[in-house]
Image (cartoon, rainbow, N blue to C red):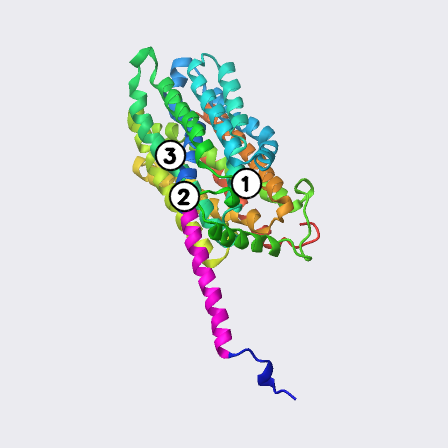
Amino acid sequence: MGSENDVRPPENQADSSQAAVEAKKIELERVLAKVSLRLIPFMLVLYVAAYLDRINVSFAGLQMNRELGFSDSVFGLGAGIFFVGYFIFGVPANMMIERFGARRWIALIMVCWGSISVSMTQVSNEIGFYILRFLLGIAEAGFFPGMILFLTFWFPKREHGMAVARFMTAIPAAGVLGGIVASRVLSMTGVGGLSGWKWLFLTTGSLSALLGVVVFFYLSDGPAQAKWLTEAEKDVLLDAVAADRSVGSGAHVVKVNPLTCGRVWLLAAIYFLFSLNMYGFQLWLPQIIKSLGDVSDSVTALLSAIPAVFQAAGMLIVAGLSDRKSERQWHVACSAWLAAAGLLTASVATNPVLSLLALSVTAFGLWGVVGPFWAIPTATLPRAAAAGGIALINSVGNLGGFVGSTLVGLIKEATHSFFASLGVLAVTLILSGFLVLLTRQPMQTKDG
């Protein structure tokens, strides 16, 4: 009869197996680095263009409101109505990317929203302002959720949080670039018979339309279609992504209908509060800074770039810490509470330098939530519910942008200062921090 040693694998066989595992891990890391270098910088540029077309109105408002006679409430509503169109078309647009592929769909919508942004140069009254901002929201609706979904085709879950954060550094990059560009373009009033704010819409809109054409020739719909990967690299990447999906689709995971999933709606409510603050803050930031002292529109635009630098730092630092600790909820909550502290400080500070510093702290915390927050649904929702769930969270959540922008405008018009507006935003952030802790319960529950 054989002994126990007879069925034990030979030592050299075990060593060989371990070496093969290590070699596969190293190869996956190499392929992921190649994918990151190919996709993330380009996707970042695309999102910079998208975000610029979304927030260029914040800089244009410094001149446009005076020239067209728009009140604070009109500007707030027009800036925010973008998110109504965004909400209506959010889920259908994200389904389109799976049906038609990222390359064709993203190219098409970028050309569309670029053309709409250019058309903003023809606005002469509040009705035209509302209509074009609404149409811009419809055109952009499929971009962000589509890109979040697109990343899941290329990156395993454990790398997804940092991939999202790197992609979304486009937000502060757009803030910095927008401030620099706006400071120069707003001074072009009279060139070609156009006002500076019209040149701003013309410049940023044309950039998006041009990039849409580039997308068609540069992006691949997924690893299997990527001509820049070898067959071996495709296999390594597809195996890693498929392994993650199989873990999330086992017998113990309930398939979730996003429309009836309580967890999806909780995440949507949390993102609603985050968006309320992000856009209530971002779309009014140049005018908040303008209220701190008597400075020109160009200087105001440049100063607006300072909080954007803190946005980038917050996104990368918090996402990095969250990935290293493999923890999401507490990182999101603490970032939200830090942003609330910054808003409260900015609302009571009388020194312009202290106020600008407090606004920068707000930016750090507010955008620090982004990476770890989006890692929560992408890591826990089953594959069958991922596309609809992410789109629903993003679409419903982004209605907060409409509420935030409009609310700040109404409060500002009623009180003639930003004191109460910033205080209201802070309270909603404190609430959001507590709500996100409720998502610590695992997704493998009866109600999802």
Q: Position of residue 388 (x, y in %)?
A: 62, 39
Q: Position of residue 31 (x, y in %)?
A: 44, 52
> Quarter holding the N terminus?
bottom right
Location of mark 3 (residue):
175
Magenta-colored stretch includes residue 301: no
CB within 8 Å, label 3 to label 1: no
Q: Main secondary structure of the magenta part?
A: helix
Q: Is residue 388 above or below residue 131?
A: below
CB within 8 Å, label 3 to label 2: no
Residue at the image point whose x is 47% and y is 52% from the top: 233
State the SS at label 3. Answer: helix
- At label 1, the amino acid type is Tyr
**Is residue 188 found left or right of 234 in the rendered image?**
left
Q: Is residue 423 above or below residue 67?
A: below
- At label 2, the amino acid type is Arg
Magenta-colored stretch includes residue 33: yes
Location of mark 2 (residue):
38
Location of mark 1 (residue):
271
Which residue is at the front of the view, 207 or 332?
207
State the SS at label 1. Answer: helix
**Residue 202 appears in which quarter of the rendering?**
top left
State the SS at label 2. Answer: helix
Sort mark 1 into few (<14), some (14-19) or many (20+) by Cα contacts within 10 Å. Answer: many
Which residue is at the front of the view, 65 or 328?
328
Residue at the image point whose x is 50% and y is 56% from the top: 327
Which mark is nearer the camera, 2 or 1?
A: 2
What is the span of residues highlighted in magenta in the rendered image?
A: 11-36
